[in-house]
Image (spheres, rainbow, N blue to C red):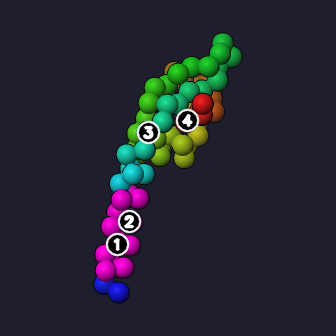
């Protein structure tokens, strides 16, 4: 039983660390075409995906897309 608990705990830690290191390229679609934002990882990527939008310096807001091929 202890062995299974150790294995399950290790798998849980592995899953969390993989999600934290997840990276994806992101872009948004502007009227002039697709604008590459670069690669975001970990908490930056999570926050960008949760927000789902990007606002430029002129106050225009665009929907962000990450990890699409």
- Marks 2 and 3 sit apart, C-alpha to C-alpha, by 20 Å
Q: Relative to residue 26, is residue 8 depicted above or below?
A: below
The reply to whether residue 66 is visible in this rendering is yes
Q: Quadrant of residue 17?
A: bottom left
* Crowd around label 4: few <14 · some 14–19 · many ≥20 (10 Å): some
Proximity of marks 1 and 2: CB atoms separated by less than 8 Å:
yes
Which residue corresponds to the image point at 38% horizontal and 65% vertical from the top-left? 11
Q: CA distance from mark 1 to mark 4?
A: 32 Å
Task: Tell which circle, 1 or 4, labels the residue nearer the N-terminal end.
Answer: 1
Tag 2 residue: 11
What is the secondary structure assignment of the residue under circle 1? helix
Q: Nearer the viewer, mark 1 or mark 4?
A: 1
Residue 14, magenta (yes or no) = yes
At 44% from the left and 30% from the top, the residue drawn is: 39
Q: Is residue 35 above or below residue 12?
A: above
Determine the residue located farthest toward the right in the rendered image. Answer: 31
Q: Position of residue 21 (x, y in %)?
A: 37, 45
Q: Is disc 4 placed on a helix, strand or loop?
A: strand
- Main SS type for the magenta part? helix
If you read the primary sequence from the N terminus, does the residue marked by circle 2 or circle 4 appear first? 2
> Badge 1: few (under 14), some or many (20 or more) residues near its Cα, within 10 Å?
few
Q: Which of the pair 49/57 is nearer the observer?
A: 49
**Residue 34 at x, y percent in the picture:** 62, 19
Q: Secondary structure at mark 2?
A: helix
Q: Which residue is mark 1?
A: 7
Q: Which residues are magenta?
A: 3-16
Q: Is residue 61 visible?
A: no
């Amino acid at each position: 039983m202890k062995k299974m608990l150790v294995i399950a705990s290790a798998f849980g830690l592995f899953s969390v660390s993989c999600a934290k290191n997840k990276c994806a390229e992101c872009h948004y679609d502007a009227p002039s075409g697709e604008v590459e934002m670069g690669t975001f990882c970990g908490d930056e990527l999570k926050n960008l995906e949760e927000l789902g939008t990007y606002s430029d310096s002129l106050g225009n807001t665009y929907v962000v897309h990450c990890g699409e091929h």
